[in-house]
Image (cartoon, grey):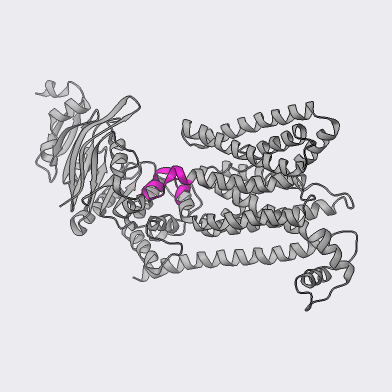
Amino acid sequence: MALLSIEDLSFAYRSHTVLSGVSFVVNAGEVLGLVGPNGCGKTTLIKCVDGMLSPEEGRVTLGGRDLRTMHRREVAREMAYVPQSAGNQTASTVFETVLMGRRPYLNWTVSPEDEERVAAALDLLDLGGLAFRKVAELSGGERQRVMIARALVQETGVILLDEPTSNLDIRHQMAVMEVLHGLAEEKGFAVVIALHDLNLAATYCHRLLVLADGSIYSYGVPEEVLTPEMLGNVYGIEAVVKQDLPAPYVVPVRPGQLQEEG
Amino acid sequence: MEKSITLREGYSRLRKTRTVFISGLLILLVILIGVGVTLGSAGFTVGESYLAILAGLFPGTFTAPEMAEVIVWDYRLHRVLFAVVAGFGLAVAGVVMQGILRNPLASPFTLGISSAAATGASVAIVLGAGLVDSEYLIIANAFLFALLASVAIYGMARYRGVSSETMILAGIALMYLFSAVTSLLQYIGTAEELQAVVFWMFGSVGKSTWPKLGLVTLVLACTIPYLIYRAWDLNALAEGDEVAAGLGVPVERSMMIFMVVASLITAVIICFTGTIGFIGLVAPHITRMAIGADHRTLIPAAGLVGAALLLAADSIGRSVLAPQVLPVGIVTAFLGVPFFIYLFMHRRNA
């Protein structure tokens, strides 16, 4: 079932067109990877989908409802957003920062249920030991996991993440992607992740959407999307794509080296 | 399961620490009020001061020496309470500004709002002199200019993108601009007007009266509960615009409302007291270091810290050169500057 559907979305900053005619759907249980070179519009697309930016044209539908007809608090109960920057340097503890994810539900007091959800999210992301440290004292990777934990306690069906693994080492990259993949497959979440690491994207995303200059270049399963041709056209690099592994694996090659060997 | 119980216990400990901190501050404040009321030339003890306060509140139940009761209720108590209320409000305004602007240096003083209010007061003193009831003209003008400054800062920050640098630069630029306007008004004013402007800018709770105290208390009573009510939105905004928007906070409208409320609180206090710096900057920092950044407790606790600081500073100002009284604005700067430098050094080291 399509939890999230984007139809013919276009966006411009003043006269500079950033996105044009972008359409895709994300089903329950699916991880969609947004890939593409720097400046191709990934972040803008995510902000349009979350309703933070208003598209010039097109429509975002969340659980069958037009986003424009929804109150921001309603949106926040159905769709969580993890921004690219790893958060601000406040004096809040990890526990309280994650607790803020309950804001769409909280009246003023914190219920035992809220506390339990926070504790569960901290355990899931292996943050239990850091719960009462200040976020400002954490490493970049730890902070990024805190932001993901905060999105999890929002209890939404859709999670949008902008470069959630950029500050993480390979073990934590995989741990985070495992969690997101598990949320999709086991709990029926729809997950949209903007990623730079194509191999990580190929390993964990059910489908990939390649964005180039604000338009969709290709959209499909990783095996179809990750081709030497795409890498040449979109990124301007030469690469070999290994298909005999569990997921397609992109090996970039220095310019000219392929011809020499071939 | 066991782990989640420990995490919840940790959070409940955090809440207990906050309760203890706030209770401690309340006790400290009661002591400071007693001491503040007792300080002065007519000699009576702290105990007699409390008795005099209680006698005024419950005439049948308590009795105090008549002289003590008259001095406390007619001369000292409103000044002491004005220091409490003013310190509370300035600290809360500082908390809100630092929170929504995500800038540890934001305060009514560093953002030029205090100097804008000074300009407004000067305009009223110099250009509006002779008008009936010019005191209320001063209040209105100080408020209007404070609002103007906050809107200007907000507008500039919005245009350039909200960042620490933009806010500080816009605030400092405005501070210089308003200082220059105030200087110009001092230059063209008569000697009497000049004196009035200079005394206004010293910052003092010496001009307090029961009606002024009532007005400030009323404004705080209308605004601070609203701020505490919206504490979660302030928490979210302190994390960043995008985070707040993602959590369902209407970002721009909320920031506008919070700026207006913080400016209103600042303006309604400093139009009576003149420029009192550093309370709005320092009290939030002390409180955040002690009990963290949850605005549900940060707002009342920082308010109490500000109240205690301002009352202590005023009591010191009344004692060090007694019978001469030092304006509290001068004392808070003397106390605040070393602390500010300490903070700055501490941050650099970290």
Position of residue A101 relative to residue A21, above or below, is: below
Q: Would residue B60 be counted in the magenta stretch?
A: no
Image location of residue A98, percent across then percent down: 40, 56
* Residue range (magenta): B236-254
Which residue sits furthest bottom? B61
- The one nearer the camera, B79 or A126, is B79
Question: Is the C terminus of chain B in the top left, top right, bottom left or bottom right quadrant?
Answer: top right
Q: Nearer the viewer, residue A42 or B68?
A: B68
Whether residue A260 is situated above or below residue A164 in the rendered picture: above
Residue occupying image coordinates x 33% and y 52% = A76
Q: Is residue A211 visible?
A: yes
Q: Is residue B231 left or right of residue B35?
A: left
| Magenta part, dominant SS | helix
The x and y percentages for residue A232 are 17, 26
Answer with the quarter of the image where residue B69 lies.
bottom right
Q: Residue B83: percent from the left, percent from the top?
A: 73, 54
- The image quadrant of residue B7 is bottom left
Instruction: In the rendered view, tell whether residue A40 sits above or below residue B14.
Output: above
Horizontal relation, residue A61 to residue B252: left or right: left
Name the residue located 18 percent from the left edge and 41 percent from the top edge.
Answer: A24
Magenta span has B252?
yes
Total numbered labels placed on residues in the image: 0
Estimate the x, y position of residue B290 in percent, counting from the top left. 58, 57
Q: The N terminus of chain B lies in which quarter of the figure?
A: bottom left
Q: Does residue B184 sit above or below B93 in this rendering?
A: above
Residue B350 visible here: no
- Residue extending farthest front: B132
